[in-house]
Amino acid sequence: MGVNGGISLHVDFEDNSKEYLSAVNNALSTTISKLGDDLQQTAKAAAPQKTGHLVNHIVMKANMSSGAYQAEVSSTASEPNHDYVEWMHKGPYNLGELSRSKPTASSKLGNYSRTVGPGYLISVGEGSQAGYQEFITNQVESINSKWN
């Protein structure tokens, strides 16, 4: 003859996964747009400037489809028979007076700064990556704290 014991519990739960995922998606979409704007502004600040043609043609594109969140900057500046963007991005060249007078380019969200000159598109994203990751993590943690 054995002795048996036990308990019976009743647990109710509410499935908020749809609302949670919607909140995360909205937060990430907003965050990626903010990061893209910061990336664009920092690249513009780091770009050499003589006439404004190069700076005014730095554009940002954000993509938030299928869970792949990204923002990128590029330049649409062009000159006939010359890859102006590549030349200005890769250097070498001497910075003009206006470029030398520009302040240090600083990413507020990426916690990164650099001087004006070659590498103004790629280096801004690479240099800001850790700060951007921290910013995204903080946004997601903020959402998570509401659902704990």
Image (tube, grey):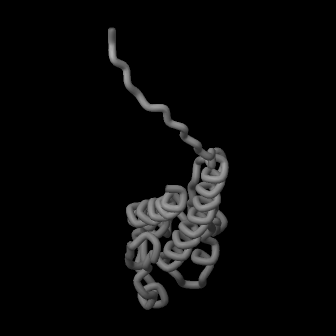
Q: Residue at x 49, y 66 (%)?
A: 121
Identify whether 103 is placed above or below 24.
Answer: below
Between 83 and 20, the one nearer to me in the picture: 20
Residue 98, position as x, y percentages in the image: 49, 89
Q: Position of residue 117 (x, y in %)?
A: 42, 75
Residue 26 in sight from this viewpoint: yes
Q: Residue at x 66, y 47 (%)?
A: 18
The residue nearer to you, when weighing 107 against 9, is 9
Residue 36 percent across, percent down from the top left: 57, 66
Q: Is residue 72 above or below residue 1?
A: below
Q: Position of residue 142 (x, y in %)?
A: 50, 64
Seen as rendered, the residue at the extreme front is 1
Q: Report the residue that reaches farthest toward the top.
A: 1
Asked whether 55 or 81 is in front, the reply is: 55
Residue 17 sits above or below residue 90 on the image? above
Residue at the spot 60% in from the left edge and 70% down from the top edge: 58
> 133 and 100: which one is in front?
133
> Residue 107 appears in which quarter of the rendering?
bottom left
**Residue under the point 45% across and 87% down:** 102
Relative placement, left or right, of 122 versus 83 is left
Q: Is residue 81 left or right of residue 35?
A: right
Q: Is residue 74 visible?
A: no
Question: Considering the image in quadrants, where does the N terminus appear?
Answer: top left
Q: How many marks?
A: 0
Query: Vertical placement of 85 versus 54: above or below?
Result: above
